[in-house]
Amino acid sequence: SQKIEQNSEALNIQEGKTATLTCNYTNYSPAYLQWYRQDPGRGPVFLLLIRENEKEKRKERLKVTFDTTLKQSLFHITASQPADSATYLCAFRLSGGYNKLIFGAGTRLAVHP
Amino acid sequence: EPEVTQTPSHQVTQMGQEVILRCVPISNHLYFYWYRQILGQKVEFLVSFYNNEISEKSEIFDDQFSVERPDGSNFTLKIRSTKLEDSAMYFCASRGDVESGPNNEQFFGPGTRLTVL
């Protein structure tokens, strides 16, 4: 069956360190992989998108990698800050169709001062 | 910066009642979506809407659900006879066409929390 898996346990790190979040998938061939941030009681906020033919994407302190052989995406936040504390969701868009998003369950990140 | 808006922010209703959740997508967007998130669970796709018709729907989106774009700005989700298990956050999202930018991502609204008693 098709699965998207993110670490269910919260990730606790010290301010200034790099946070690395993992998204693994099985039985999918996503055309696009997207990362969103979600704060409690709020809607997902788009962060980065990476295409299946791209290995890496960067935006300011954020970096996403996409390994279609390992079926894995890694999401990095460098020089993390307490304000980065939130739940981070990975989501797939398949090619074709009307591009619905298929979400993972999310990983909660807590950055401590 | 343009944003998706949703009203109300919180809706409380009795089981069996009809509810209408409202969304105003970003004005030049063409694709519209509803998702829901039950407390503590993942965001789930409900339905997509393009060119004034449903383009795709999930198994969750049964006959009790309907969507409408009654005018050029609003996009609504109606639940005809609510059940306890419909309690969730409902998110509207919209997306432009391929020329709207390299990312062409979906922008989400803040959500409506629906509580069915």
Image (cartoon, coloured by chain):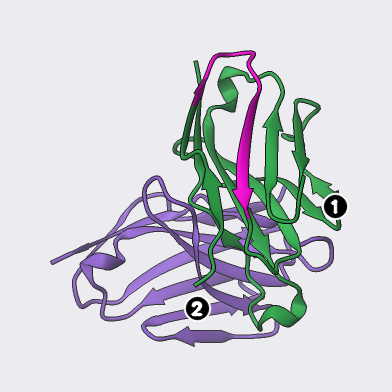
Chain colours: A purple, B green
Give me the residue at 69% from left, 52% from top: B33
The residue where tag 2 is placed is: A64
Residue A21 highlighted magenta (yes or no): no
* Rendering coords of residue B49 (x, y %): 79, 52
* Residue B19 position by quadrant: top right
Tell me if residue A51 can be seen.
yes
First to last magenta residue range:
B12-24
Provide the major secondary structure of the magenta segment.
strand
Local secondary structure at mark 2: strand
Q: Nearer the viewer, residue A51 or B57?
A: B57
* Point 82% across, 49% down: residue: B56
Q: Are marks 1 and 2 in contact (CB under 8 Å)?
A: no
Asked if badge 1 and badge 2 are on a common chain, one would say: no
- Spot occupied by residue B18 in the image (x, y as percentages of width and height): 66, 21
Q: Is residue A80 left or right of residue B90?
A: left
Which amino acid type is marked by label 2?
Val
Q: Chain of mark 2?
A: A
* Helix, strand or loop status at disc 1: loop
Residue A27 occupies quadrant? bottom right
